[in-house]
Image (tube, rainbow, N blue to C red):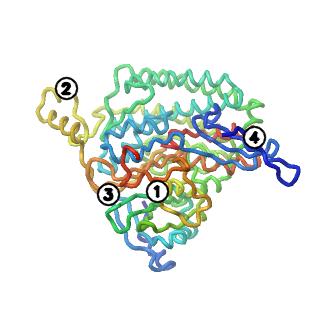
Amino acid sequence: MERFTTEKVDGDSEILTINMGPSHPSTHGVLRVVLQLDGETVVKATPHVGYLHRGMEKIAENKTYHQFIPYTDRFDYLAPLSNNVGYVLAVEKLLGIEIPPRGQFLRIMICELSRIAAHLVFVGTMALDIGAGTVFFLSFQQREYLYDIFEKLTGARFTNSYTRVGGVARDIPDGWIEMVRKFISTLPKEIDDYDRLLTRNRIWLGRTQNVGVISADDAKDFGLTGPNLRGSGVEYDVRRAFPYTGYENFDFEIPTGTVGDAYDRYLVRMEEMRQSVRIMRQALSRLPDGPVSADAPKIFLPQKEKVLTKMEELIHHFILITESFDAPEGEVYNSIEAPKGELGFYIVSKGGKSPYRLRIRSPSFNNLQALPKILVGRLYSDAVATIASLDPVLGEVDR
Amino acid sequence: MGDLHEYLEQLKKKIPDSVFGTGTFQGQDYAVVRAEKIADICRFFKDELGFDFLTDVTAAHFPDEEYQFEVIYHLYSFSKNERVRLKTKLREGEEAQTVTSVWRSANWNEREAYDMFGIVFTGHPDLRRILMPEEYDEFPLRKDFPMKGR
């Protein structure tokens, strides 16, 4: 493809068409946007997505419910644990099972830690895109500590696949709680550092204030969710609207913006990290004892020690591994507040071991829809700041 | 899920013969509504009942049934804090009506349903493939499309 073309309009004015992406450092993945410029002003923007399409929904129809869990890591790959939780909650809704309090607390903790991890990437990369490189190194350092925490808990740094239908893979290992305590005690100071570097920085204000403005009505109309919707002043958070896995027992605030510009979306995410720390503190102080997984031997894998010594557990293990479990006939929609917004799963089951249809309602897909509207009439250089402030993850857009 | 049945009674008064049936599973209700009226029905849900947010539009393929395709709409109301699920059923070759005039977010969702299932949404402003390449001529989420691809 040609890198750019020009065409004459109205005799003297010229429209320049340039291609941004799919491999461009500021598109955070493989987003391609074709921009038409009049001078430096964008007159039309057309996003092209699908470069990372792997057919997740088709794959789900051909896998058992448990086999699909590793694929969920690869939607929003900046917060795999959050996707894991969202998916198994939908399957558990279909099966009608609930997990014990300790398991629920653990799920809340990993959801909030992944929210912090995802927002750390956001603040680092957005600052880098706008030209403030320092924040990137600071926030990625913190993210590195988080990945150590994930590694200790799940055995993997990136693709965690930690949850199971009916619980989580394993209980908290020794020393993990101390690691988390240490991390959440130092993180607020780090966030204050980013605050000092950016929030009142003149260049930052100039690059983000009144850039990429989305009104509250537009945000609703375009189906935005998550920090992008809240940045426009709409207080909608699935954790509050449809509490799941015990969020109703936690105190936290839902930050919202007033203008709906890139700066508001940045502020909302910064505050969300602080609120996540708050939720983590509550979870750690009230963490109950007991099992982490539901007592559902026909769904959840038995403990390995018991498999080797007890006949019944051995049979369940064998059946679950070779055949998996049957789900009832029906259909459910269940969603969670993922770092990027409402991550929903709509499962149609006709009975049997695989979903008949699994729909993934990913937040980034809908969030990107607003892009053509908010880029038009703005400068080309604002496009970078706008895309960064919407914080799309292309693994989730394309699925 | 709110009290869907009450909304449907109101809907029937406004648009007769618009509801075919309802169902429920795990406390979640849904209604099957008339496909040719879906834009009006959605407009009613948005303007009269306050469902101002379209969470999702998607489809499903049932090749053994007379109505091979279902289009599924998930609506949400900020003021009521409720979700509603509406479905329409289509025969092979029948076209669906777009709801982009009601919520602009339907644009990409309907494009994806077209891309994956080949359901044509009449009145859609920009019905192109979205995830698959433009020159591709299969609809991968149909049940007769093999897992390994073609």
The numbered mark at residue A142 is: none
Give the alpha-carbon distance from disc 4 to disc 2, as whole Å.
61 Å
Residue drawn at x 21%, y 38% is A322
Q: Nearer the viewer, mark 3 or mark 1?
A: 1
Between discs 2 and 3, the one toward the N terminus:
2
Q: Amino acid at mark 1?
A: Thr
- Label 4 belongs to which residue? A380
- Label 3 belongs to which residue? A330
Within-10-Å neighbours for mark 4: few <14, some 14–19, many 20+:
some
* Dot 1: element: strand
- Residue B41 percent location from the top left of the image: 51, 71
Q: Nearer the viewer, residue A46 or B25?
A: A46
Give the alpha-carbon distance from disc 2 to disc 1, as whole Å.
44 Å
Residue drawn at x 24%, y 35% is A301
* Dot 4: element: helix
Within-10-Å neighbours for mark 3: few <14, some 14–19, many 20+:
some
Q: Amino acid at mark 2?
A: Glu
- Label 1 belongs to which residue? B58
Say left or right for B11 vs A135.
left
- Residue A202 percent location from the top left of the image: 78, 31
Q: Chain of mark 4?
A: A
